[in-house]
Image (cartoon, coloured by chain):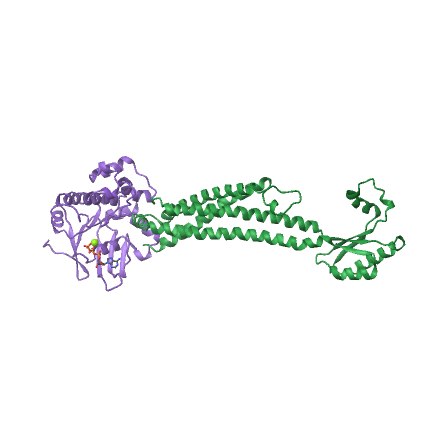
Chain colours: A purple, B green
Amino acid sequence: MVRKQAARNGTQTLIAFENAAYSYGGGELLSEITLRLAPGSFHFLTGPSGSGKSTFLKLCYAELLPTAGRVTLFDREVRDLSRDDVALTRRRIGVVHQDCQFLDHLPLSSNVALPLIVAGRTTATGDLQDLLTWVGLGPLATALPPSLSGGERQRAALARAIIMGPDVILADEPTGNLDWEMSLRLLTLLVELNRMGKTILVATHDLNVIRQAKSQIAARVLRIAKRRIQLAGADL
Amino acid sequence: MVPPSGASAWLTSFTSGAMTFLAVFAMALSLASGKLANRWAEALDRTATVRISAPEDQMAIQTKAVLEVLKTTPGIAEARALTPEESTKLLEPWFGPDLPLQDLPLPQLVAVTETGAGYDAEGLRQRLAAEAPGAVLDDHLRWRRPMAEAAGRLRLLGLLSIVLIGLAMAAMITLAANAALAANAQVIRVLRLVGARDTYIARAFVRRFTLRAASGALAGVVLGLIGVALLPAQDAAGGFLTGLGFSGLGWLLPLVLVPLAALVAFLATRTAAFRTLKRLT
Ligand SMILES: Nc1ncnc2c1ncn2[C@@H]1O[C@H](COP(=O)(O)OP(=O)(O)OP(=O)(O)O)[C@@H](O)[C@H]1O
Ligand SMILES: [Mg+2]
């Protein structure tokens, strides 16, 4: 409760990097990253394929730990988090993974409700159905993930990312395999969430999506170049 | 949350069943040999008899000599000459109460009680032969001592078997659990990503393996008990092999193997699960 208020007042740092670096074992993929996601902000993260966008997001939800410097989630350094702390932190960060990460043996509704289930919480069937309807998947609640189209999977992943009412939503190429119309729909959902107060970070290399978003909302663009992350100019 | 895992499920139930089936026999063996050891040890009772057959006029002298020898033999706690009435009573089962025993030349009996350490039977025999030629040391129950010891060992072996069976079961269930964990690596990864704690994920596996082990164990115990019950009944001579079985409430004893198997599975799976989870972020 205290934390929620702090977030609203803008005094809490949701995600902060301080001179952080990451290396998979070879040379550093990301170096000297210093940035801070302000509550309620909307950021895009761009860069060529292989530049480290997914890697950066993984640092943001503690799937990876920085190999140098500090990463702070909700005012706590990731290296100090116990395994249970990591689990609890992830409940406050909704992630749309690049490859969705569904459990293929469970129907869509269970996959979307999975964060609630593992947290030992229940949800009214009506709420779940409302959420599925909101992302346009109402009739597909009982479908198994492998039978869904790319766009349906992406929207289901977004639904799962927000079901816990997280403070932050990270989306890795959420429009990666969508046509323009579907990309717009998904973008609209993200913009709506941002208007509801969620902090949003979207990794994408689709400049059209970024332009479209900037016409609707004050989104900023972070660009990975030469292992560093810089705020892009207004040229986008 | 974890999909059913065919092979490891069967492996667990089967292993648990087979192992408890064996454990039931080990238990029966252990109990039967324990009973036998006690019975034989009791029968030994640390007593022996010296029988003196001598002409009537020498009887008193030889009895005195025998008692004297016994008194000075290390390892003998007590020696007492039986009264004629006591001797008669001992013979009753063989000759009936009506036989006029007083007309027969009865041997004099001396009851000997040894100390815990026991005595040197051969040495005693030689001294008796020298002091009282009519005296015979009858320690026929002595041969049972190594048997009683063997029975005691057998009981230990039975218990050891149960422990080994438990360890083997833990090893096999660990292998099965590791296989299941490896097969579900992606599921575990997704659960971690959406904020599941290790205990939540481990519980899914632990519950499954514990239940399987318990149900397998129940089947194994029932089959094992049927197997024991079908052994030939104990005969009057109390032979060892035919004495393999349970009696009365003892038949319920093997049921403790069910929670025991469940406990083994619980611990083995839990350990395996946490070891696997520690390696994931
Ligand atoms: N687990 C890993 N081990 C070693 N190298 C890795 C690993 N994961 C990613 N990499 C490498 O790190 C680099 C950055 O990968 P990353 O997935 O972050 O890129 P990306 O910017 O998300 O690319 P894309 O736009 O194609 O999704 C790539 O060269 C990739 O091969
Ligand atoms: Mg990527």
Q: Residue furthest bottom?
A: A27
Residue A231 is situated, as x and y percent measured from the top left of the image, at 16, 56
Residue A13, horizontal then vertical, whole percent: 25, 52
Ligand 1 lies in quarter: bottom left
Q: Residue furthest top?
A: A126
Give whichever of A79, A30 is nearer the camera: A30
Q: Is residue B257 left or right of residue A12?
A: right
Which residue occupies the extreme right position in the image?
B57
Q: Is residue B73 visible?
A: no
Dividing the image into 4 quarters, which one contains the N terminus of chain A? top left
State which quadrant residue B138 falls in. bottom right
Q: Is residue A216 left or right of residue B189?
A: left
Q: Position of residue A120 (x, y in %)?
A: 34, 42
| Numbered marks: total | 0
Residue B117 as seen in the image, left or right of residue A126: right
Q: Residue at x 83, y 56 (%)?
A: B134
Q: Residue A164 placed where, x, y %?
A: 28, 43
Residue placed most toward the observer, B140 or B85: B140
